[in-house]
Amino acid sequence: MGAAIGEILPFAVGVAISPLPIIAVALMLVTPQASRNGPAFLVGWVLGLAVVGTIVLLVAAPTDASEGGEPAAWVDWLKLLLGVLLLLVATRQWRGRPHEGEEAAMPAWLGAVERFTAPKALAAGSVLAAANPKNLLLAVGAAAAIAQTGISGGEQAVAYGAFAFIGTLGVAAPVVVFFALGDRAPLLLGRLKDWLAGHNAAIMTVLCLVIAAKLLGDALRGFAG
């Protein structure tokens, strides 16, 4: 199982560093509903990651992702596809970056976050964890990496649980700050939101490129072996 956890670490860190979801939860935490919406968003986030992982692991189980201790051929092809898709995400982020003197454009839906109720916050967490292209690709990659190790179903669940835990640290940090700092939290959360908004494109570009390089390298090594 140690090998599986080692495989998922880059994917988990990639999910944890998600600027837009962190901005969304920071906005929720400066509203009167903050004490309910923040935890609801976290629950939704974990549920979203859990659904993706469960589906991939269940699909991979009968197809035998490990052959003789080595990844099955389809796993290498999946890694190649995920790597290419992440390169496309990185390219899109870089092309959409704000130029000098421009203000970073934020998605229109962020304007509605401050009016969310707890159920909407939970739904937003689920969608941003599972349907966001970058997170979806990374969650699928993590689940496939776990499946290819050939460990038992119970160990796969534990390894994916570790992925979900690490992947939740980024969006959990503002919630921890909110409950720990009380009245001082809004100022810090506002600064965090502004910094992430200004550097979102650069963060996403570098992150996607690094993980894409790992996936493509793993795929090519699998083909060569």
Image (cartoon, helix red, strand yellow):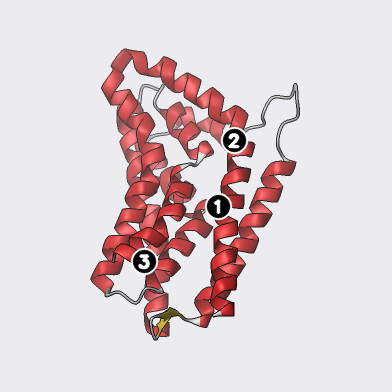
Residue 103 visible within the image: yes
Looking at the rendered image, the quarter that the N terminus falls into is bottom left
Question: Could you tell me how far apart the alpha carbons at marks 1 and 3 are, in whole angstroms?
Answer: 18 Å
User: Pointer 1: what residue?
Assistant: 134
Question: Can you tell which quarter of the image residue 149 is in?
Answer: bottom left
Question: Residue at label 3?
Answer: 54
The earlier-in-sequence mark between 1 and 3 is 3
Return the mark for residue 200. 2
Number of numbered labels in the structure image: 3
Evaluate if marks 2 and 1 touch, with contact meaning CB atoms under 8 Å apart. Answer: no
**Residue displayed at 43% across by 44% down:** 16
Q: Position of residue 70 (x, y in %)?
A: 43, 80
Residues at marks 2 and 3, CA–CA distance in whole angstroms: 29 Å
Q: Residue at x 41, y 65 (%)?
A: 143
Specify which label sits upstream in the sequence, 2 or 3: 3
From what the image shows, is residue 76 above or below residue 167? below
Please, what secondary structure does the residue beneath circle 2 have? Answer: helix
| Mark nearer the N terminus (2 vs 1) | 1
How far, Cα to Cα, is label 2 from label 1? 13 Å
Dot 3: within a 10 Å radius of its alpha carbon, few (fewer than 14), some, or many (20 or more) residues?
A: some
Image position, residue 82 (x, y; %): 58, 64
Q: Nearer the viewer, mark 1 or mark 3?
A: 1
| Residue at image point 52% right, 81% down | 73
Query: Label 2 is placed on what type of residue?
Result: Asn
* Residue 72 placement (x, y as % from top left): 47, 81
Q: Are marks 1 and 3 in contact (CB under 8 Å)?
A: no
Name the image quarter holding residue 223.
Answer: bottom right
The dot on residue 197 is none
Badge 1 density bin: few <14, some 14–19, many ≥20, Cα 10 Å: many
| Image position of 140 with respect to 192: above or below | below
**What's the amino acid at mark 1?**
Lys
Under mark 3, the amino acid is Thr
